[in-house]
């Protein structure tokens, strides 16, 4: 399983990558796109100033 990740911050910063770890796939799989997006925003909050 492979998930394409594309994060866009209000600053115009975009983070694009792929997450292939199984725990991530299991956690994101059953969730909706909105819930997954919120999870990603919390996970990468420390990367975006």
Image (cartoon, rainbow, N blue to C red):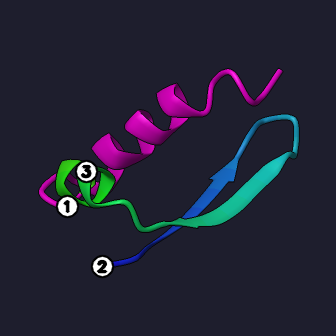
Q: Name the residue under label 3.
A: 23
Residue 49 figure quarter: top right
Callout 1: SS = loop
At label 2, counting other C-alpha atoms closer than 10 Å, the crowd grade (few under 14, some 14-19, many 20 or more) is few
For marks 1 and 2, the one nearer the N-term is: 2
Side of 13 relative to 2 (left or right): right
Secondary structure beneath dot 3 equals helix
Could you say which is closer to the camera, residue 11 or residue 23?
23
Answer left or right for 20 relative to 24: right
Kindly report the distance in space between the C-alpha atoms of the residues bearing marks 1 and 2: 10 Å
Position of the N terminus, as image quadrant, is bottom left
Judged from the image, the secondary structure of the residue bearing numbered disc 2 is loop
Return the residue at label 1: 29
Q: How far apart are marks 2 and 3 (CA)?
A: 11 Å
Q: Which residue range is magenta in the image?
A: 29-49
Query: Pointer 2: what residue?
Result: 1
């Amino acid at each position: 399983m492979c998930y394409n990740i594309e994060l866009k911050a209000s600053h115009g910063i975009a983070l694009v990558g792929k997450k292939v770890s199984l725990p991530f796939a299991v956690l994101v799989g059953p969730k909706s796109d909105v819930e997954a997006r919120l999870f990603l925003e919390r996970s990468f909050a420390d990367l975006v100033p």
